[in-house]
Amino acid sequence: MSTSSGEARGVVSAPAWDGDPDPRVPWRVDGLLAPFVAAGALVSADVHVARRLGAIGGEPDERVHLAVALAVASVRSGSVCVDLTSAPAAVAADLGDRDPDVGADLPWPALDGADGWRAAVRRSPLVADGPHGPDDRPVRLVDDRVYLDRYWRDELAVRREVEARVRATLPVDLSSLDDVVRRLFPDDADEQQREAVRVASGSLLTVLTGGPGTGKTTTVARLVAALQVVAGPDLRVALAAPTGKAASRLHESVNAEVAGLPDADRDRVGTLAASTLHRLLGRRPGSSTRFRHDRTRRLPYDVVVVDESSMVSLPLMARLVEALRPEARLVLVGDPDQLASVEAGAVLGDLVEALHGRAVVRLTRTHRFGHELGGLAAAIREGDADRTLALLRAGGTHVHLTETAGDVASPHELAGLRRDLEDAGAALVAAARDGDATGALRALGRHRLLLAHREGPAGVAHWAAQAEAWVEGVTGGRPDDGPWPPGRPLLVTENDATSGLSNGDTGVVVRDLGGEGSDESDAAVVVAFGDAERPHLVRPHRLPAVQTVHAMTVHRGQGSQFTRVTVLLPPATSPLLTRELLYTAVTRARDSVHVIGSEAAVRAAVERPVRRASGLRHAL
Ligand SMILES: Nc1ncnc2c1ncn2[C@@H]1O[C@H](COP(=O)(O)OP(=O)(O)OP(=O)(O)O)[C@@H](O)[C@H]1O
């Protein structure tokens, strides 16, 4: 494939390439887009995609290339599109968070007028103009939002399905609904949970939101029981979550709740199986965007419940709603204040905003933390930096702040973290060496270090190594430990049907006192995963890809909770430091949280909500 370097207006000098260019390779870009690359608003790969589309589609106007490159960049950073009206302010704000001088005076084209930026984009042969524009163009312009067309189509699919589902009302026998609601939630204080059941009974879409410990999972179990009475019997129910880890947690907690239901309800519900969304939809080998179940081959369920739906990307949500039977009920459960999906879209948050309360039930009564943690989470969620800092500084049994003087914590400032890591590590190694899988799994859930970055001085790679060194300092390696030292905490990084492990599962190497390994390298050790009471034991040679997990990113921690969490904040200038990141990190703690960072970093996080551009939140 040739590059665009030979064209009249082609200004990218680069070698030939056969696929996606590596965004880390510096490409020389000149012309209108150069200052955008220099400022960090675009990477050269964005420019390259835009210029190639321009070359193929016969569009020489650099302003159109800019719009397309920004659309590509926006997907990379989690947005679904770029809004031409707000792009200058959004880019300046993003760049200015890091350096106030950068991004303020980029050469933005004038938007309005017959020869303005908007008009140039609208009449471009690359661009379909409006929702009814031609469907063979790579880019679409709708209300000043520029989309790569496939994201527009995904957004449209979700919007249409949601609109249809919200409009439909299902006939319900109100007196039997009232009976079952009162039986399942006898306490008047549980009115919000009752309301969730009423909404799910009467409509095809229910959005159930709430912070951690507000009873979402509990409600799911009872809601299914209620639906079996008012819309059943024998409804086929699927439970799903975006990650394997979240799916197994959902499976455990819903079935535990079902076990406590009155006999008749429990029998009606039976055992519910939870799987990942990918598995529910049916993976197709070699494709991550198409599934076995789609519009032509719908999912055979009457009720589909998706937990942790804040983590579901727009493309995956589109595939799900397309695959639902039109009469199936969809229940989306999650916390829209948490980090959104790694891929593009913030569907749950957008829907909550767009639906204006229709089909949405928010649970606000916390059952789990009756202490400082709940107040801290609320202050962060509400964007109140002063209150967040005051609560952190006041501290208490459950909240602790180590306020660092600079961007990087000094050894003195790290003393508390070191102690936590050493204590948890020592307990882990002691139980593992004793062959006590239950004790080791409990120790594994005792403390977790969460970070924003994967790489760099504030990243997981550095801190995992540091933590390991500290732990080894107190536990000492043993000559007979072999390649799988007992007490090593592991994170699974791929899904694996053979071992039953999913990407995100964590486990610990434990001495197998009674057993024999199948070869020398894993003789006499097993790796314990899952529920501490009923550990799932896997021989090392059967493990899928794993890594040592003394520390993990907040993203990785999403969907899990730990007794104690330490959040080590990056410098205030880190683009990853957002309100959602801090909220998600703090709410991973079941009992106590320790935040390490500067005042500037705490303020930056709380005051910087993620801005993901999308049309979904305006659309309904
Ligand atoms: N109506 C209720 N009355 C008393 N306890 C409740 C009620 N609803 C939930 N709980 C309890 O509150 C705790 C948290 O509930 P649950 O796990 O359902 O919350 P959640 O919102 O799903 O939390 P997370 O998002 O952290 O998983 C559980 O111990 C549950 O038994």
Image (cartoon, helix red, strand yellow):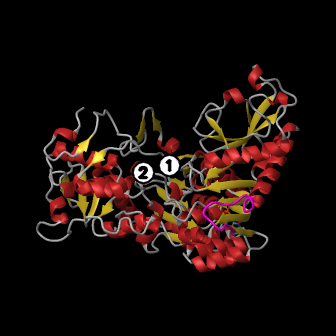
Quarter of the image where one finds residue 596:
bottom right
Rendered location of residue 476, percent (x, y): 84, 39
Quarter of the image where one finds residue 418:
bottom right
Can I make out residue 165 in this image?
yes
Q: Which residue is painted at 46% across and 45% down in the image?
A: 299
In the image, which residues are magenta? 403-414
Residue 5 drawn above or below residue 449: above
- Mark 1: secondary structure: loop
Mark 1 beta carbon near ligand 1 (under 8 Å): no
Say which residue label 1 marks.
Answer: 301
Which circle marks residue 325 in the picture? 2
Compared across the picture, whether 82 is left or right of 253 comes to left
Rendered location of residue 278, percent (x, y): 50, 43
- Mark 2: secondary structure: loop
Q: How many marks?
A: 2
Residue lying at the far top in this picture: please name it: 519
Say whether residue 600 is magenta. no
Quadrant (top left/top right/bottom left/bottom right) for the N terminus:
top left
Rendered location of residue 232, percent (x, y): 55, 56
Residue 600 drawn above or below residue 157: below
Q: Residues within 10 Å of mark 1 (few under 14, many from 20)?
A: some
Residue 518 drawn above or below residue 469: above
Q: Residues within 10 Å of mark 2 (few under 14, many from 20)?
A: some
Check contact, mark 1 vs mark 2: CB within 8 A. Answer: yes
Q: Amino acid at mark 2?
A: Arg
Quadrant (top left/top right/bottom left/bottom right) for the C terminus:
bottom left
